[in-house]
Image (cartoon, rainbow, N blue to C red):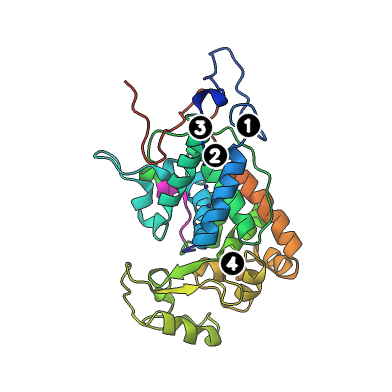
């Protein structure tokens, strides 16, 4: 899923909005709730939505990035924006690991954070901005509006050292992929729906040449192979080169159920796409989603909601980062 796929405005005075104080020891942690910032930054969600809309107008691929971000952040132990932290002298950024190959547009997420900070400094977490941008990016791509809770706080450390224990790889067996998601509470139809994000964006040739060279994978649709070979002419592509294949040639910019029809026709680019369409546990749901976009959207919405609520930091845990790329300095 190289791209996907996936998402962020203004202060008149510090006194215009009251900042939510840290919870006292004996105060109850509300956890995640709908419209968490209604009192402390009532414009927060509208600001994110408008920023996502403006960015999508200028850079269509930002929506794919927002969608990928929620998966790459929330699937790794906690939905705490650890993905956004830059590397330090002591720790590697999650953004720089092999599993994050192809992730981009982080600078635009910083723009969204700055816009929110101008309106309500020190109130809205990067973790919530990441989730809200994914929600609004999905809508930009023609997908469903998914009501998502807020109230997350930001982690202070990169999880690069454990990323491979949580993020499934596109070459792993479908049973491993299902098990990884099951540990987050996402069931089989939910996994099938989440992989429907492969309906948008593109896949870099680095991720699929093993299906073309030295011999073409016989499972691939021959009609699709010609296009893949045209787009990926080198058996060892340059990771920095602009060499990629659209995940869905029919509707590449739309999150829809065309992906399922493609993989049933053996036009999936990745091994996981092929396995999804042929696995005993997954194929019935693939066929159902190929027939019904409503069913796909329903299961996709449910799975994104569960993913967005995976082990968040709330209450007094974590912090509200001033900048999404670095943890706050504590003296």
Residue stretch rendered in magenta on the structure: 163-169
On residue 128, which mark appears? 2
CB within 8 Å, label 3 to label 4:
no
The residue labelled by disc 1 is: 36
- N-terminal of the pair, mark 1 or mark 3, is 1
Q: Which residue is mark 3?
A: 153
User: How far apart, in angstroms, are the residues tagged by discs 4 and 1?
Assistant: 32 Å
Residue 328 occupies which quadrant of the picture? top left
Question: Going from the N terminus, do you reach mark 2 or mark 1 first?
Answer: 1
Q: Does 301 appear above or below 255?
A: above
**Considering only order in the chain, which callout, 4 or 2, is on the residue closer to the N terminus?**
2
Q: CA distance from mark 3 to mark 2?
A: 8 Å
Whole-Å distance between the Cαs marked 2 and 4? 25 Å
Dots 2 and 1: beta carbons under 8 Å?
yes
Q: CA distance from mark 1 to mark 3?
A: 12 Å
What SS does tag 4 mark?
helix
């Amino acid at each position: 899923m190289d791209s996907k796929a996936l998402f962020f405005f203004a202060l008149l005075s510090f006194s215009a909005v009251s900042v939510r104080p840290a919870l006292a020891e004996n105060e109850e942690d509300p956890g995640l709730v709908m419209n968490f910032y209604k009192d402390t930054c009532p414009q927060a969600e509208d600001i994110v939505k408008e920023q996502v809309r403006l960015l999508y107008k200028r850079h269509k691929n930002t929506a794919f990035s927002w969608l990928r971000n929620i998966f790459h952040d929330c699937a790794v132990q906690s939905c705490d924006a650890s993905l956004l932290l830059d590397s330090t002298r002591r720790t590697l950024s999650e953004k720089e690991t092999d599993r994050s190959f192809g992730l981009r547009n982080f600078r635009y997420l910083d723009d969204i954070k700055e816009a929110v900070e101008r309106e309500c400094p020190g109130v809205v977490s990067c973790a919530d901005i990441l989730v809200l941008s994914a929600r609004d990016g999905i809508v930009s791509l023609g997908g469903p509006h998914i009501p998502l809770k807020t109230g997350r706080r930001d982690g202070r450390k990169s999880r690069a050292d454990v990323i491979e224990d949580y993020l499934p790889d596109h070459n792993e067996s479908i049973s491993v992929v299902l098990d990884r998601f099951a540990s987050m509470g996402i069931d089989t139809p939910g996994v099938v729906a989440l992989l429907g994000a492969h309906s948008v964006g593109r896949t870099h040739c680095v991720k699929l040449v093993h299906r073309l060279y030295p011999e073409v994978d016989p499972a691939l649709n021959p009609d699709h192979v010609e296009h893949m070979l045209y787009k990926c002419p080198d058996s060892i592509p340059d990771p920095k080169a602009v060499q990629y294949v659209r995940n869905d040639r029919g509707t590449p910019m739309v999150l829809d159920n065309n992906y399922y029809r493609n993989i049933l026709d053996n036009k999936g680019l990745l091994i996981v796409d092929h396995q999804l369409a042929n696995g005993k546990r997954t194929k019935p749901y693939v066929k159902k989603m190929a027939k019904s976009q409503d069913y796909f959207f329903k299961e996709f919405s449910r799975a994104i909601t569960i993913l967005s609520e995976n082990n968040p930091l709330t209450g007094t845990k974590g912090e509200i980062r001033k900048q999404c790329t670095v943890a706050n300095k504590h003296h």
